[in-house]
Image: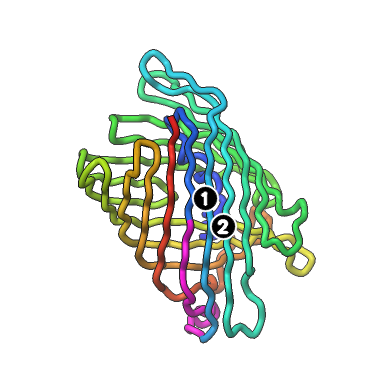
Amino acid sequence: MKKGLLTVFYGITHLSCMVYAQTGISGEFKTEYIPYSSYIRPEDSVKTNSKSDFKRMDINLNIPLSMEKTKDGKVKGWSLLLNGAYAKMSHKNYENSLFPDQMLNAQVGLQHIRPLGGKWSMMASASVGVYTDLENVTFDDVLGQGGVVFIKKFNPNLALGAGPILTTAFGVPMIMPWIYFDWKTGNKIKFNINFPQGMEAGYQFSDQFALKAVVDLNGMTVERNKGGKSILLGYQQITAGLRPEFQLNKSVSLRLTGGTALLRSFTENDRKIKSIFKTKKMEDPRFASTFYMALSLRWNLP
């Protein structure tokens, strides 16, 4: 499967990852910055004098519509999920315009969670959103997707789930897999994997402070018109670094991340199912590794 297809998953996990087992209004505001780094040509993998940076603001909101706890303490209910991500890129020394100056992904969705008995539960979500470079916003920029995942919680520290996703990102409805994995160990030392978002390992020094080593996967999707044909342009990034986390009070936490952007690349796909299985003739356009920093504020109101 081509890397560009991962951006389909990012939109869904943004809408679902925050709200599992949450009963109050929660949200996150995040900013990211990647300074200028050299563009690497896909045809010969040569690092050029062309450079691009990346700046993004991202906000996620989870608004419970109906929540109740069962007799055994499990959560059942519906939530309204909102996500908006705006990215700005600046470019230097390009002969032709290769990449968008702006990208906007805005989604609204519903999520339903319910226990199924024993250690099993179900999480389902559906969303519709606008995925655009803001140059010519049309109905082609509107994409819908949804999915259901069945999760087994083996113990308080380990949960595993899988299920199908229905997406219209390729112009026609199609089903793709959705995988959920969450693992934590210990009260002080913690290790967490949440695919396809990333992984983290850290130490909880106190109730107010933790330090983690993290690897994050992220991306965006925009619809563009090329030669009179609607295509999808996928942006992917993999970052790694250290993340100190500060619990400011019972409801608000602050997270700072500093490290390296290991990978930044673009992938172009036409909106046909067969493009999933197409063999690439060359590498994706990408950028050299450089510094990465991010700041996020999370809140979870009772």
Q: Is residue 46 magenta?
A: yes
- The coloring applied to the image is rainbow
Give x and y (percent) for residue 140.
Answer: 74, 53
- Could you tell me which residue is drawn at 47 percent across and 53 percent down? 30
- Could you tell me which residue is drawn at 23 percent across and 45 percent down? 204
The dot on residue 131 is none
Q: Amino acid at mark 2?
A: Met
Task: Report the span colored magenta.
Answer: 31-48
Q: Quadrant of residue 174?
A: top right
Instruction: Give the quarter of the figure containing the C terminus.
Output: top left
- Location of mark 2 (residue): 220
**Which residue reaches farthest front?**
249
Give x and y (percent) for residue 64.
Answer: 53, 29
Of residues 137 and 251, which is closer to you in this image? 251
Dot 2 crowding, Cα within 10 Å, few <14, some 14–19, many 20+? many
- Location of mark 1 (residue): 10
Q: Distance from label 2 to label 1 (Cα)? A: 7 Å
Query: Which element is circle 1 on?
Result: helix
- Could you tell me which residue is drawn at 55 percent across and 27 percent down? 78
Of residues 128 and 80, which is closer to you in this image? 80
Which sits earlier in the primary sequence, circle 2 or circle 1? 1
Give x and y (percent) for residue 272.
Answer: 68, 55
Q: Is residue 92 magenta?
A: no
Q: Amino acid at mark 1?
A: Tyr
